[in-house]
Image (cartoon, rainbow, N blue to C red):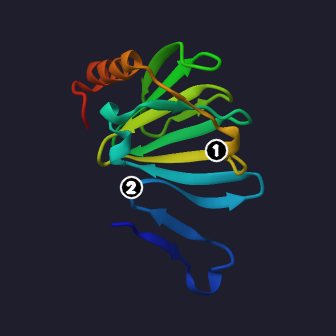
Amino acid sequence: MCTFRLGFFGMYSQLLEIQEYTGEGYRPLVDFAGWRVAILNYSPDLLPDRLTRMQRHNETDEVFVLLQGRCLLFVGTGEDTVDSLHAADLEPGKVYNVRKGVWHTHTLSVDAKVLVVENRDTTYDNSPFTPLSAGQQEELLLLTQSLWGCADT
């Protein structure tokens, strides 16, 4: 079930806007000037055994902050394809900045909620994907097992 709520405090609505997103996956909540704030929640397509590609943003960094649950952030080196993989087990409240041009993807626990901050003009046009080989997909599973003790969330 997807819940998207916009809340206001009576006559103070011009001062404070409150939004939340409790559905699956990614949802932008605030776009202002040059930046965007979004929420990323668990989604079955982000299970470790379903990760088949990585994305990079050619024009901007992207920030992730774990609010609850667990999130593994996978990053990769390489120009047109991923040469090597690394994983960070996000800690709540810490800011993780994925640099411009770095391949990345993630897997989340069912109860996960991640705050995402990015440039407002981050689109599929400037954020290409690259496929992962079968060996790299297996490596993501092994990284998940080594950090979380299991391959599934």
**For residue 118, side relative to residue 64 (left or right):** right
For label 1, the SS is helix
The spot of residue 96 in percent (x, y) is: 55, 32
Residue furthest out toward the bottom: 11
Q: Residue at x 31, y 23 (%)?
A: 141
Q: Residue at x 69, y 43 (%)?
A: 125
> Height in image: 11 above or below 95?
below
Crowding around mark 2 (Cα neighbors within 10 Å: few <14, some 14 to 19, many 20+) is some
**For residue 146, side relative to residue 19 (left or right):** left
Q: Which residue corresponds to mark 1?
A: 124
The spot of residue 19 in percent (x, y) is: 52, 67
Which image quarter is the C terminus in?
A: top left
Question: Which of the two discs, 1 and 2, labels the residue nearer the N terminus?
Answer: 2
Crowding around mark 1 (Cα neighbors within 10 Å: few <14, some 14 to 19, many 20+) is few
> Height in image: 27 above or below 131?
below
- The amino acid beneath tag 1 is Tyr
Label annotation for residue 82:
none
For label 2, the SS is loop
Which image quarter is the N terminus in?
A: bottom left
Depth check, front residue: 125 or 92: 125
Determine which quarter of the picture holds residue 51. Answer: top left
Depth check, front residue: 13 or 31: 31
Q: Which residue corresponds to mark 2?
A: 24
The spot of residue 49 in percent (x, y) is: 31, 32
Q: Residue at x 64, y 44 (%)?
A: 124
- The amino acid beneath tag 2 is Glu
Residue furthest out toward the right: 33
The spot of residue 102 in percent (x, y) is: 61, 25
Q: Residue at x 43, y 22 (%)?
A: 87
Residue furthest out toward the left: 150
The Cα atoms of the two marked residues, 1 and 2, are separated by 20 Å
